[in-house]
């Protein structure tokens, strides 16, 4: 089972023009692969994730295609995507804690969702309870209201709910961001467990936290200003990144374990370009210490080593 | 010296304050000039409450906070204003810290009326410029802008500049970089390091252990309102004694190692009210028993 | 009324986006852009301005007095008497324009009184919270629950509501609770913002913070509340006047209706007599409410249709 994304362009309509949030993105996710999608805020990673399931009415699909196992996904048509959601492609949204209706018991929420997909709750219930226990929740959770659960518990409930119908692709959007450190690990490991047990075939884990991706992802895809910068196995991206942005980003993270007195880390000066009217050529050009004249032309996203794609003229 | 002694904060919740919620319990520690102390805790640990109590934004229920020997909670009016000239705070959300309908220079002009009344215009501008340069910003590039026109990093640095303008001794930094992008975080963090070298004492409140490890001299781990471990950063991180500290260190995702196996990642209350008595296991390294 | 502080969702690259982080400048020009395109606002405001004009200029166009009697008794509109005459022979047009003027005066005074109390109570309750909030909450609830008309009837029985101003003040003093509640809620959410903490850390006094930091941030909200208080007061005044509890020496639209009904104008088919005040009251209040809805849409991006 593979997911193939080809030349995807998704823009947001605004009064002042189109915000080119995802601007020509091509990659694929293999069977059983956990792919991490990393980038800072505004780079388009959340948009990319949501466009694969088409859950946001403000998005406008402009170009490109997505196919699941060589079957195209109707990502430009909200209604047509209805029959794929939760069954083929599922999403654990950002702020999943707020995804549970506060005025209904958890069990009822799940039941209603399943019925709307044409699945009988009673038929699925034993499996549901088994999975809840797997993530460390008791099946009594079904009889509780969301407000009675902690943040981590809600997150895990939503994860179970999103994967109940064994979707081929799961998109997890910043699911660890709002959690405490101790629950983050549990939730991240649950993701891997779901993949290992076959509840989900492949995953796209969207986050700004490279360190979490290093722990759980097989591959990491780095996005910058609506375009792809680098894609490689997690170990390679962290240990030997090729794109200047990735290199600078990693060397600005305290998660490497140094202290201020030992080694001064540095950030990346400047800000990402506005996506309302993006500059031509490489989008990282203005902040890149290695920029030269070829960078005025947009670099293609090429495979420079086996399984290692980069979009940078300096590397080619 | 900023000292907290058996500081406790109890909130009354419910209609007319029926129930009680203890946010901080018997907290004791000191902050000296020229050092960065990290206050590390998860949500509900009371770390923000500690910061607010030091800044007199919320009253202390029991215990004392003293600044150079004076009880902070007794300060009123003029003395309180003087206190704010020595101790200031910067908070988590840069966009919430600015009144959106005014330009950013307002945070400085607000101080001018209160603290720099006699200062001539040229001298005020010079002082302002010096503070902004100290945080790496150019006055002409930011002072006349509105908050939404600047980045989160710039806004936080302006807030630090504001604190520096007053020539403070201590800064309470409450999660000041959590809402910033990864590539700008480190710049603000490095700024704290520079200021420390110039004699500023910083209470760095955070949930992120990696940040604390990078910048702080001493670390305090807070859990449900009580200190469970306190000591030099290298000791606390290198030789953690308390089970909670070990749990936190195990759970932190890092870039140089992977998580070791499937630990009991679920920290759900083993100990509802841990005892606040601290035992010294190494010089300066205290652990709650 | 929907909360006005716009939580505009902007997709801006590079910065961590926070709600409410819109510039006054951009908002203002956007506001004007939407203001002039909003039909409700334009229609409502237009109608209101027209009625205001009539109230100001109308009485100058005639040298008749509202309480004077003239020779024509119960005559339909004619070139002599533009809106006809009442059964005892008063000029309906003169009464109408004076009544309209009275409505504006009552609305303005009562609106201001109610707004002042609502702001004092709302700001204090929202900012201080705790015990102050509890006490003010009780006060608000008591005043809210008191049947205003009943109280005013009792008051009118003991004091002669002699003038427009005293009527307006009475109305103002009893109609503020809902606005106080709304202001409290908005103040509450603004008071938790860090810029309020920062103002405290700059040594600013409490009421200075409320008036210079918080209130300007909810200015559109306060404006809308005032418009509703204004309109509501006119309605209450009309009701009181209709029941005969208003000042009897000042002509008002409600008083006109009172006299018209007690003289069986409906049965006698003297439509000009009751239709004029009826339409007058309806028009002012409708104009205000429609304007309010339009303004709400202008101030709150989420309600816009585009």
Image (cartoon, coloured by chain):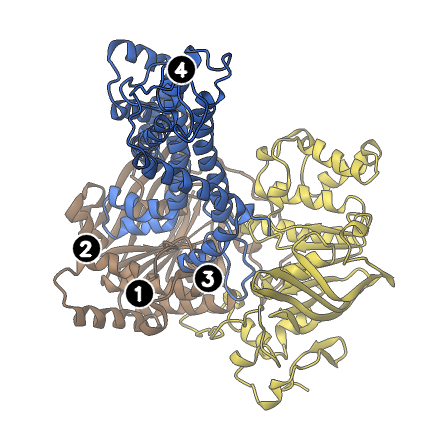
Chain colours: A yellow, B brown, C blue
Would residue C113 appear left or right of C297 to someone viewing this image?
left
Marks 1 and 2, how far apart at CA: 17 Å
Image vertical order of residue A291 relative to residue A125, above or below: below
Q: Closer to the observer: label 1 or label 3?
A: 1
Labels 4 and 2 within one chain: no
Q: Earlier in the sequence, mark 3 or mark 2?
A: 2
**In the image: residue B236, left or right of residue C212:** right
Q: Position of residue C286 (x, y in %)?
A: 48, 33
Read off the chain for label 1: B
Chain at numbered mark 3: B
Residue shown at the point (24%, 18%) measured from the top left: C162
Circle 4 is placed at which residue position? Answer: C87
Q: Are marks 1 and 3 in contact (CB under 8 Å)?
A: no
Q: Earlier in the sequence, mark 1 or mark 3?
A: 1
Which chain does the residue under circle 2 lie in?
A: B
Among numbered discs 1 and 2, the one appearing first in the sequence = 2
Q: Are marks 4 and 1 in contact (CB under 8 Å)?
A: no
- Which residue does the image show at 54% across and 70% down from the upper left? A274
Few, some or many C-alpha atoms within 10 Å of disc 2 (few <14, some 14-19, many ≥20)? few
């Amino acid at each position: 089972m593979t997911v193939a994304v080809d030349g995807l362009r998704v823009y947001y309509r605004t009064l002042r023009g189109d915000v080119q949030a995802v601007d020509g993105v091509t990659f694929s996710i293999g069977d059983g692969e956990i792919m991490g999608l990393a980038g800072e805020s505004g780079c388009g990673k959340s948009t990319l994730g949501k466009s694969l399931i088409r859950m946001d009415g403000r998005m406008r699909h402009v170009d490109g295609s997505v196919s699941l196992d060589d079957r195209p996904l109707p990502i430009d048509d909200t209604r047509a995507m209805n029959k794929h959601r939760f069954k083929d492609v599922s999403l654990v949204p950002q702020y999943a804690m707020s995804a549970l209706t506060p005025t209904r018991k958890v069990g009822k929420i799940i039941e209603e969702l399943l019925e709307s997909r044409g699945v009988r709750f009673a038929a699925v219930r034993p499996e549901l309870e088994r999975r809840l226990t797997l993530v460390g929740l008791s099946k009594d959770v079904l009889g509780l209201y969301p407000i009675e659960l902690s943040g981590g518990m809600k997150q895990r409930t939503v994860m179970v709910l999103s994967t109940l119908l064994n979707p081929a692709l799961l998109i997890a959007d910043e699911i660890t961001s709002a959690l405490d450190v101790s629950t983050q690990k549990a939730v991240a490991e649950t993701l891997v467990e779901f993949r290992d047990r076959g509840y989900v075939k492949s995953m796209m884990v969207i986050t700004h936290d490279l360190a979490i991706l290093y722990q759980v992802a097989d591959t990491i895809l780095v996005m910058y200003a609506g375009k792809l910068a680098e894609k490689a196995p997690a170990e390679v991206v962290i240990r030997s990144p090729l794109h200047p942005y990735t290199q600078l980003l990693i060397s600005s993270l305290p998660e490497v374990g140094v202290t201020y007195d030992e080694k001064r880390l540095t950030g990346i000066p400047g800000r990402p370009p506005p996506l309302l009217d993006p500059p031509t050529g490489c989008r990282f050009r203005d902040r890149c210490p290695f920029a030269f004249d070829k960078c005025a032309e947009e670099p293609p996203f090429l495979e420079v080593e086996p399984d290692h794609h980069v979009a940078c003229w300096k590397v080619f | 010296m900023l000292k907290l002694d058996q500081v406790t904060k109890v909130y009354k919740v419910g209609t007319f304050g029926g129930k009680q919620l203890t946010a901080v319990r018997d907290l004791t520690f000191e902050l000296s000039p020229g050092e960065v102390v990290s206050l590390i805790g998860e949500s509900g640990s009371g770390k923000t409450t500690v910061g607010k109590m030091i800044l007199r934004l919320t009253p202390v229920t029991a215990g004392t906070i003293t600044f150079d020997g004076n009880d902070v909670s007794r300060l009123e009016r003029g003395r309180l204003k003087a206190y704010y000239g020595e101790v200031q705070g910067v908070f988590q959300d840069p966009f919430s810290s600015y009144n959106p309908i005014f330009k950013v220079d307002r945070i400085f002009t607000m101080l001018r009326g209160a603290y720099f009344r006699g200062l001539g215009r040229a001298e005020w501008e010079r002082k302002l410029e010096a503070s902004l340069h100290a945080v790496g910003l150019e006055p002409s590039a930011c002072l006349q802008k509105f908050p939404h026109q600047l980045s989160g990093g710039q806004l936080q640095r302006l807030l630090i500049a504001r604190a520096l303008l007053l020539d403070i001794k201590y800064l309470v930094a409450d999660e000041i970089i959590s809402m910033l992008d990864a590539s700008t975080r480190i710049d603000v963090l490095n700024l704290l390091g520079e200021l420390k070298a110039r004699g500023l004492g910083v209470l760095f409140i955070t949930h992120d252990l990696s940040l604390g490890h990078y910048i702080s001299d001493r670390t305090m781990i807070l859990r449900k309102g009580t200190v469970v471990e306190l000591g030099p950063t290298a000791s606390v991180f290198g030789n953690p004694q308390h089970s909670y500290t070990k749990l936190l260190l195990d759970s932190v995702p890092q870039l140089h190692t992977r998580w070791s196996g499937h630990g009991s990642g679920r920290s759900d209350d083993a100990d509802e009210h841990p005892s606040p008595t601290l035992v010294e296991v190494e010089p300066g390294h205290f652990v709650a028993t | 009324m929907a909360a006005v502080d716009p939580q505009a969702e902007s997709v801006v690259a590079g910065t961590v986006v926070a709600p409410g982080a819109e510039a006054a400048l951009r908002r203002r020009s956007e506001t004007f852009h939407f203001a002039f395109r909003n039909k409700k606002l334009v229609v409502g405001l237009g109608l209101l301005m027209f009625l205001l004009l009539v109230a100001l200029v109308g009485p100058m166009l005639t040298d008749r007095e509202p309480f004077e009697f003239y020779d024509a008794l119960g005559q339909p509109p004619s070139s002599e008497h533009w809106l006809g005459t009442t059964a005892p022979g008063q000029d309906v047009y003169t009464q109408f324009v004076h009544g309209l003027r009275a409505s504006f005066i009552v609305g303005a005074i009562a609106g201001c009184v109610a707004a002042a109390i609502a702001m004092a109570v709302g700001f204090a309750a929202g900012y201080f919270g705790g015990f102050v909030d509890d006490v003010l909450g009780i006060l608000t609830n008591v005043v809210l629950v008191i049947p205003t008309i009943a109280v005013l009837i009792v008051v009118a029985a003991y004091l002669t509501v002699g003038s427009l101003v005293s009527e307006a003040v009475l109305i103002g003093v009893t109609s503020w609770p809902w606005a106080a509640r709304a202001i409290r809620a908005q103040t509450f959410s603004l008071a938790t913002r860090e810029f309020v903490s920062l103002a405290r850390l700059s040594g600013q006094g409490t009421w200075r913070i409320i008036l210079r930091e918080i209130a300007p941030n909810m200015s559109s909200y306060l404006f809308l509340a005032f418009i509703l208080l204004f309109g509501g007061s006119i309605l209450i005044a009309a009701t009181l006047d209709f029941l005969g509890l208003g000042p009897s020496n000042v002509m008002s639209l409600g008083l006109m209706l009172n006299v018209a009904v007690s003289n069986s104008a409906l049965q006698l088919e003297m439509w000009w007599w009751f239709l004029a005040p009826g339409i007058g009251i309806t028009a002012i209040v409708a104009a205000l409410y429609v304007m309010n809805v339009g303004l709400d849409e202008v101030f709150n991006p989420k309600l816009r249709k585009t």
